[in-house]
Image (cartoon, rainbow, N blue to C red):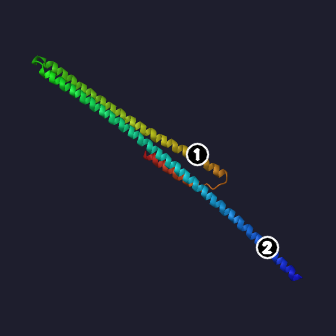
C-alpha cells in the first residue's frame, strides 16, 4: 500500500515536471518567435529606409541629368542661332563691301565710316555675348545651389522624422540602439555630403 502511494506520488511528481518542462519550452518558443519578429521588423525598416534613400538619389540624379540635357539643347540652339546670325551679317557685309568697292573713289570716306560702324557693332555684339555668358553662368550656379539646398532640407526633414520615430519606439519600450546607430551613421553621411557641396 505504501509502495502504491510512493509510486503514485512519483508519477504525480513526474507529471508536474513534464508540465513544467512543457510550459518552459512554450515560453522559450514564444520568446524566440518574438525576437525573430523583432529582427524581421528591424530588417524591413532598414530596407525601407535604404529603398527610400536610393529612390531619392535616383530622382535627384534624373532631375539633374534632365536639367543638364535641357541646358545643352538650349545652348546648342542658341549657338546655332548665333552662328546663323553671324553668317547672315557676314554675308550681308560682304555684299555691301563689294558694292562699296564698285563706287567711285570719292566715296572712300563713306566706306571708312561704314567699316567703323561695323567694328562698333561687332564689339557691342561681343560685349552682349560676354554679358549673356556671365548671366547664364551665374544662373547655373544659383540652380546648383538651389538643388543642394533642397537636398539638405530633405535630409534634415528625414532626420527629424527619424528622431521622432526613435522617441516613439523608446516610449513603447523597444530597443532603439540599432536605430540610433543607423541614424548617427546617416547624419554623418549627410554632414559629409553637405560639406562636399
Extreme residue toward the right, this view:
1
In the figure, is residue 137 to the left or right of 88? right
Q: Quarter of the image holding residue 133? A: top left
Nearer the observer, 109 or 170: 109
Residue 82 drawn above or below residue 100 = below
Nearer the observer, 155 or 105: 105
In the figure, is residue 8 to the left or right of 100? right
Q: Residue at x 77, y 73 (%)?
A: 17
Nearer the observer, 13 or 185: 13
Do tag 2 and tag 1 residues touch (Cβ < 8 Å)?
no
Quadrant where the N terminus sits is bottom right
Q: Which mark is residue 161?
A: 1
| Separation of marks 2 and 1 at Cα, in angstroms | 54 Å
Q: Which residue is mark 2?
A: 15
Quadrant where the C terminus sits is top left
Residue 14 drawn above or below residue 196 = below
Residue 36 locus on image (x, y percent): 63, 61
Residue 30 locus on image (x, y percent): 69, 62
Amino acid at each position: 500500500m505504501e509502495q502504491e502511494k510512493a509510486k503514485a506520488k512519483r508519477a504525480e511528481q513526474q507529471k508536474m515536471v513534464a508540465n513544467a518542462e512543457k510550459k518552459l519550452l512554450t515560453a522559450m518558443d514564444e520568446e524566440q518567435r518574438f525576437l525573430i519578429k523583432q529582427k524581421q521588423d528591424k530588417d524591413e525598416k532598414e530596407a525601407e529606409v535604404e529603398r527610400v534613400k536610393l529612390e531619392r538619389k535616383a530622382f535627384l540624379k534624373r532631375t539633374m541629368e534632365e536639367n543638364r540635357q535641357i541646358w545643352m539643347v538650349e545652348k546648342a540652339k542658341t549657338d546655332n542661332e548665333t552662328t546663323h546670325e553671324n553668317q547672315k551679317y557676314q554675308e550681308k557685309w560682304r555684299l555691301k563691301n563689294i558694292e562699296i568697292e564698285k563706287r567711285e573713289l570719292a566715296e572712300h570716306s563713306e566706306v571708312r565710316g561704314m567699316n567703323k560702324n561695323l567694328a562698333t557693332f561687332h564689339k557691342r555684339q561681343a560685349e552682349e555675348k560676354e554679358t549673356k555668358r556671365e548671366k547664364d553662368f551665374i544662373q547655373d550656379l544659383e540652380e546648383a545651389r538651389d538643388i543642394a539646398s533642397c537636398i539638405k532640407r530633405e535630409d534634415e526633414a528625414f532626420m527629424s522624422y527619424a528622431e521622432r520615430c526613435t522617441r516613439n519606439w523608446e516610449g513603447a519600450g523597444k530597443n532603439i540602439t540599432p536605430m540610433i546607430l543607423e541614424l548617427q551613421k546617416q547624419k554623418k553621411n549627410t554632414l559629409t555630403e553637405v560639406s562636399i557641396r
